[in-house]
Amino acid sequence: MPSIDFKVYLISDRTKTLGRPLSHVIAEAGRAGITAVQFREKDLSLREQLQLASELRSIAKQCGMQFFVNDRVDLCLALDAEGVHLPSSGLPAAVAREILGGSKLIGVSCHSLEEVQRAEWEGADFAVLGPVYETPSKRAYGLPLGIDLFSKVRRSTTIPLLAIGGVNRSKLKEVLDAGADGVALVSAILSSPDVFQECKQLIDEIKRFRGV
């Protein structure tokens, strides 16, 4: 099974690339050293998702990036992706594991301590917790959790935990100090005018904060 060795988890959204092809943005992120990307284009039909995900999967392979598919276990298998990422209200991680076997990674989006604990109990390999900060894209999931609650969840669970929601370079030190194993980012990377440089700076700052 692939390992959870990524500190930055890039989540796709072709509407946030400033008009640039998603394939170009993902390639720039991979060239800069981002090692994990999640395909999340839920508004497309399954056939359209397969077509675009196949293109991005190829780019990810060329760049040495682990490739995850949001929600769709069938697409994960069809593309031989490294893993699937499940919404908190979606397929239980234990069921996904039965389908995928032991060779794939399973991540789960969570919005509370209870959801992270359930994901861990069901056998998820990692969880993404948020929104930590205020962000328009996550308002449907309620008020921001805040850094104190994130830290509490980190102390109460053992699986790798990534922070999401309003996270950018200015918030990196705070979330890492709170125990985050990494960060999951959308706009902070996709909407950057210079994706390559933004990713390089993110990686360098994480290394500096970690003392690597």
Image: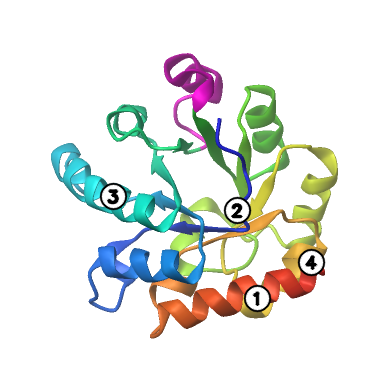
Q: How crowded is mark 1: few (under 14 residues within 10 Å), some or many (20 or more)?
A: few
Q: What element carries label 1?
A: helix
Report the front residue among 177 and 103.
103
Q: Position of residue 114 (x, y in %)?
A: 70, 35
Q: In this view, does 78 lie above or below 182?
A: above
Q: Where is residue 79 in the image (x, y as percent from the top left)?
A: 29, 35
Q: Mark 1 points at which residue?
A: 204
Q: In this view, does 141 lie above or below 18?
A: above
Q: Earlier in the sequence, mark 4 or mark 1?
A: 1
Q: Position of residue 156 (x, y in %)?
A: 83, 39
Q: In which quarter of the image is the C terminus?
A: bottom right
The answer for how far apart the CA atoms under marks 1 and 3 are is: 26 Å
The answer for how far apart the CA atoms under marks 4 and 1 are is: 10 Å
Tell me if 149 is positioned left or right of 188 in this view: right
User: Can you tell which quarter of the image residue 166 is in?
Assistant: bottom right
**Does the rendering let one see residue 118?**
yes
The answer for how far apart the CA atoms under marks 2 and 3 are is: 19 Å
Q: Name the residue under label 3.
A: 58
Q: Give the range drawn in magenta.
A: 88-103
Q: In this view, does 34 lie above or below 39?
A: below
